[in-house]
Amino acid sequence: MDPKFIFYQATLWQTFAKVIPLIIAIVVAILYAVGFRDWPLIIDSLLSLAFIFFVTWWFWVIWTIMLIASVLEKSKVNLQDIIQEVKSFKENIKDLKN
């Protein structure tokens, strides 16, 4: 997975976190201005939308953590292979000197 894609998604979530409260405030202000004052319905609707947003965000976090763990594991394996190759290279050089 491309790290740029993860960065793009994180930036998108940051934008959502900044924009969605503003949109909610505007919607509530419009509803209040037009005389719709059924507050329990408004609050229930907003809480339902917030819940959906939070659950979606949480699954994205879990997915991203799994992806990063996978990348780190692959890096660890590759680094161990490189260390083995360097050790082998050192041994070959010692053998050539003798």
Image: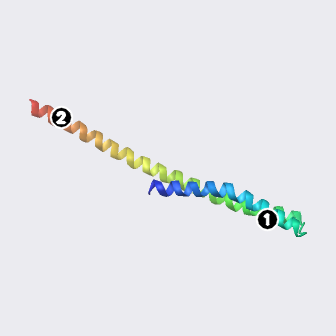
Count numbered badges in the picture. Answer: 2
Query: Please, which residue is most extreme toward the top here?
Result: 98
Image location of residue 52, percent across then percent down: 69, 62
Instruction: Tell me the quadrant of the picture where the N terminus can be found.
Output: bottom left
Image location of residue 43, percent across then percent down: 83, 61
Image: 35 above or below 72: below
Residue 19 appears left or right of 43: left
Residue pointed to by mark 2: 91
Which-is-in-front pick, marks 1 and 2? 1
Q: Quadrant of residue 94?
A: top left
Amino acid type indicated by mark 1: Val
Question: Which residue corresponds to the image point at 54% horizontal and 56% vertical from the top-left?
Answer: 63
Question: Which residue corresponds to the image point at 68% horizontal and 60% vertical from the top-left?
Answer: 53
Question: Which residue corresponds to the image point at 35% horizontal and 46% vertical from the top-left?
Answer: 77
Amino acid type indicated by mark 2: Glu
Residue pointed to by mark 1: 27
Task: From the viewer's side, name the closer residue of 37 and 32.
Answer: 32
Residue 82 appears left or right of 69: left
Image location of residue 19, percent across then percent down: 69, 58
Image location of residue 76, percent across then percent down: 38, 44
